[in-house]
Amino acid sequence: MAILSAVARLGDEKPLRRASARQFRLAVAVCLAGFCSSAAEAPQEHQVKAAFLLNFTKFVEWPATAFADDRSPLTICILGDDPFGPTLDHIVKGEEVNGRSIAVERIRRPPRPQACHVLFIPKTEKEVRRILSAAGPGVLTVGEGDGFLRDGGMVAFVIENRRVRFDIRRGPAGAAMLTVSSKLLSVARTVDK
């Protein structure tokens, strides 16, 4: 919850490679809560976005039909260029949401039904509208920049005053049969219909 209470200041330093996933998540949460005082302590942009991707899974409800069965993991898919590297894998390691483990997949094409529950589309991806229209129900679409929401996306990361923020469009999420928690909506920079 602490990670959603604020946004992060972006630093230029490389992350410590030896920190455990839980230590890293704690460090990101502390910085997001505003307790980091220098750029050397602040996480990088891709680290903050990775932490947000994990936390979005905790504040969205998926319909049962989004999963192949009761043991299927909740899968975060990265389409095309992966800006996260191993960071996202470290952050989700050992995490569960509603009794489901969390998996990370890197894909080159829009996903098949029930393959992805969160679909991250980086700003380098072309034909965003076509990709979004193919996403189907039960997929939370996350991208970058103001244009992502105009193209039909649900959550868009934006940089404001060197901080990672996000905007939400509820209409596409509802059409995909997803329920976005009011807690997540309350920390978004903007919420549109």
Image (cartoon, grey):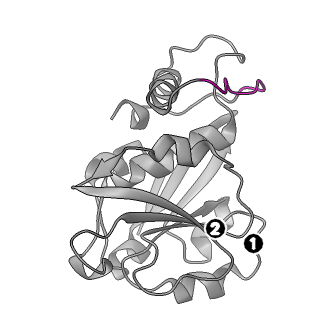
Question: Is 174 located above or below residue 159 in the figure?
Answer: below
**36 w.r.t. 118: above or below:** above
Q: Residue 164: horizontal and vertical position, in percent?
A: 61, 40
Residue 10 visible in the displayed image: yes
The residue wearing badge 1 is 125
Q: Tell me the amino acid under the disc marked 2.
A: Ile
Q: Which mark is residue 121?
A: 2
Residue for point 75% across, 27% down: 14
Location of residue 177 by image quarter: bottom left
Q: Residue at x 21, y 72 (%)?
A: 70
Q: Position of residue 171 (x, y in %)?
A: 39, 75
Examine the rendered structure and indicate whether residue 142 appears above or below residue 86.
Answer: below
Q: Tag 1: Cα neighbours inside 10 Å, few (<14), some, or many (≥20)?
A: few
Q: Can the viewer see residue 189?
A: no
CB atoms at circles 1 and 2 under 8 Å apart?
Answer: yes
Image quadrant where one finds the C terminus: bottom left
Which segment did they paint magenta? 11-18
The prevailing secondary structure element of the residues shown in magenta is loop
Label 1 – label 2 distance at C-alpha: 7 Å
Instruction: Judge whether residue 15 is colored magenta.
Output: yes
